[in-house]
Amino acid sequence: MSTQANLRTVVRGAYDIQKLRIQMGNRIVGNFKAKLGQEPGHKEAELDTEGKAILATIRAQFKKITDGVKSFPLQKSFKGDEVISDYTELCLVSQYVDLERYEDQHFRRLGTILRGYRVWSEFLKGVKGVGPAMGGVIISEIDIHKAKYPSSLWAYAGLDVAGDGGGRSRRKEHLVEIEYTGRDGTPAKRVGITFNPFLKTKLVGVLASSFLRAGENPYSKVYGDYKHRMENHVKYGVQNDGEKDDAGRKITSKLRRHNMAMRYMVKRFLVDLYKAWRAIEGLPVAPEYSEAKLGMTHVA
């Protein structure tokens, strides 16, 4: 097994634990709300602000119950309160706390592993908004030797088509025919995607937001400049908000401009990543199509 494959296993494993921890956290919060007579939520992808506050209270009470105890409390000796009222709830919270600890251990170990990758120490580590978790995703999911051009990274990350500002998707018009060999050895075809959905989700859904939260940095400036351009665009500008095309679809909106700017910001980061990583590996660095074929110099 290659080093990259091993790293991918570590990264995917960490995110699998994170997903399970979030799902369990939502269920614990749902149970707590139901106990208070509230309608529990059904969202499993993430914890909302209220959910995080409830979990913080439950976690603090769990620590109070187990603090200084050599072994996990026995059912016969457990006495509940208004927060953790029965032994089953105590066990559920204990599982959540264990997952939280395992998740933290995985991501901390990932930071240690990345020290052995030059692209991390010589480029990614210095990019404001990129931490070990995102660095692990990028290094384990991208084979820079196969990325001949900057646009190769855009295509692999599903950012090579405009869509509604979010790039390539699973919509019919974005699918392609893929040839494969069936179980009986005969050639066959199926329709499938051409990009890495895990990578796209982390780049657009996590890294882009991280750039904006990181404060002043080159990529948040790219976002701001591009969004400003779109606000004054002849088609996507604010003057067309609420207007619809001949098919009855909204031409543009504040959210669409935001998504377009987020996608554009990530694409600019991928160009910088391509140039730095290919140079580190001693590979040829090709200019962008707009520079090589159109003679254009990039500006935000």
Image (tube, rainbow, N blue to C red):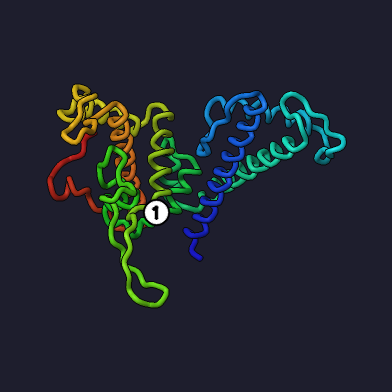
The secondary element bearing badge 1 is classed as loop
The answer to which image quadrant residue 82 occupies is: top right
Say which of 173 and 137 sits in front. 173
Q: Position of residue 255 (x, y in %)?
A: 32, 29
Left/right of residue 155 with respect to residue 29 in the rendered view = left
Q: Tell me the quadrant of the picture where the C terminus can be found.
A: top left
Say which of 12 and 7 sits in front. 12
The amino acid type of the residue labelled 1 equals Ile
Image height of 146 relative to 60, above or below: below
- Residue at (65% x, 41% y) in the render: 101
Left/right of residue 261 with respect to residue 121 in the rendered view = left
Count of marks overlaid on the render: 1
Image height of 205 relative to 16, above or below: above
Left/right of residue 271 with respect to residue 103 in the rendered view = left
The answer to which image quadrant residue 97 occupies is: top right
- Residue at (41% x, 38% y) in the render: 205
| Residue where numbered disc 1 is placed | 142
Say which of 39 and 283 sits in front. 39
Q: Position of residue 81 (x, y in %)?
A: 77, 25
Q: Position of residue 30 (x, y in %)?
A: 61, 32
- State whether residue 275 appears in this view: no
Left/right of residue 183 with respect to residue 59 in the rendered view = left
Q: Position of residue 239 (x, y in %)?
A: 19, 22
- Residue at (14% x, 50% y) in the render: 293
Q: Residue furthest bottom?
A: 185
- State whether residue 31 appears in this view: yes
Q: Residue furthest right?
A: 77
